[in-house]
Amino acid sequence: MAVQTAPAPVRRPRRSLAPYGFLAPAVLFFTAFLAAPIVYASYLSFRKAQVKGLGLGSAGRTEEWAGLSNYARALSDPEFLASVGRVALYGLVLVPVMMALALTLALLLDSGRTRVGGFARTSIFLPYAVPAVVASLLWGFLYLPRVSPLVDVLELVGLPAPDLLSSRLVIVAVANIALWGGVGFNMIVLYTALRSVPQEIYEAARIDGASDLQIALRIKVPIVVPSLVMTVIFSMIATLQVFAEPTTLSPLSNSISSTWTPLMKVYRDAFVRNDVYSAAATSVVIALVMLVLSFGFLKLVGNRAFDQEK
C-alpha cells in the first residue's frame, strides 16, 4: 500500500519594502504641504477670536468655536459676492477665447503647411514660461498711456488709444495677460494629442475626397475632445485662482481694489486685517466652488468625450 505524503507548503514571495520607500517622500511632501494646510484651514474656518477686556496680553484674546458663522459672513459679504461676479465675467471672456486660439493654432501646426513649425511652437509656448508677475509688469508698461509705445503707434495712424486700465476695460486688460501666457500651454497639449493620431486615418480621408477643413472638423477636433475637456477644466481652475495679474496691476489703476478677486480678498483678510478665521472660511468656499464646477463640467461633457475616445 502506497503512503501518500502531504504536499509541501507553498512559500509566498516576500513583499519588498522598496516601493514604499520610493513613495514615502512624495507622501510626506503631499501630507506636509497640501493635506495638512487644507485640514488646518478647515479647522480655522470654524473658529473665531474672542477679545476680553482691553484685549491686552495672551489672556485678552482667546480662540473659540464659531460654528458656521464665518461661512455665513463670507457668503453674505458684498465684497466677496462682487469679486465672484468679476471672476465669472473674467472667465467668460478668457476661457472661450483661449481655447479657440489654442485649438486653431494646434490645427494649423498639425496641418504641416508651415515650414517653421518648431520655431512657431516655441514662440507660442514661450510666454507660458514667463512668470505671471513679470508678464503683468510688462503688459502694465504697455497699458500706461504716458509710457506705452502702443499709444504712440495708434496716434500716428490716427486711431484713438483705449484706456485699458479704466473700470470698463480692466477685465479685458487682465484677461489679455492670462491669454498671452495660457494659449501656448493649451496649444501644446492639443498639438500633442493630434500628433498621436495615426497618419493613415488622414490619408484614407484624403483618398475619399475630404478637404483639409473637413478633416480638421470631422476627424481631428473629435479626436482631441478629451484633451480639450481637460484643458478647459485646468483653465477654469486657473481662472478661479487669478491673483498675481490684478495684484500687480493694482498700483497702476484705481479700478482694481484689494478685493477685486476672491483670492485677493482672502489675502487682505488674512494678512492686512489679521482675520485668518474669515479668510480660512472664504478659502474653503472657493475650494468647494472649484470642486463643484470642475467635477460638474467633467460629469456634463467628460463621460461623452471619453466614451467617444474608446
Image (spheres, grey):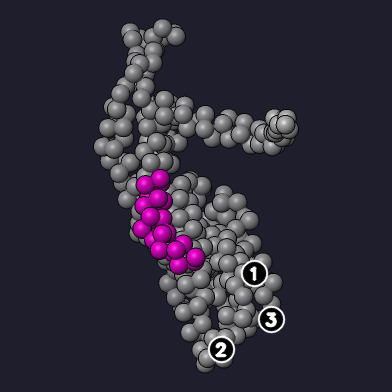
Q: Nearer the viewer, mark 2 or mark 3?
A: 2
Q: Position of residue 293 (x, y in %)?
A: 37, 50
Q: Nearer the viewer, mark 1 or mark 2?
A: 2
Mark 1: which secondary structure?
A: helix
- Name the disc covering residue 121, or none: 1
Measure the C-alpha gap from mark 1 to mark 3: 12 Å
- Residue at 58% across, 67% down: 193
Mark 2: secondary structure: helix
Question: Which part of the image, by quadrant, shows the N terminus?
Answer: top right
* Observer-nearest of 275 and 116: 116
Among the two numbered marks 1 and 3 on one chain, the one whose residue lies closer to the N terminus: 3
Q: Which of pointers 1 and 2 lies earlier in the amino acid sequence?
A: 1
Give coordinates of residue 243: x percent, y percent.
Answer: 48, 46
Q: Which residue is mark 2?
A: 206
Q: Three-letter amino acid code at disc 3?
A: Arg
Q: Is residue 279 above or below residue 261?
A: above
Q: What residue do we see at 57% from left, 86% from top?
A: 204
Principal secondary structure, stretch drawn in magenta: helix
Question: Which disc number belongs to residue 115?
Answer: 3
Residue 56 is drawn in which quadrant? top left
Residue in front for this viewpoint, 213 or 243: 213
How many residues crowd mark 2 within 10 Å: few (<14), some (14–19), many (20+)? some
Q: Position of residue 306 (x, y in %)?
A: 46, 62
Q: Amino acid at mark 2?
A: Arg
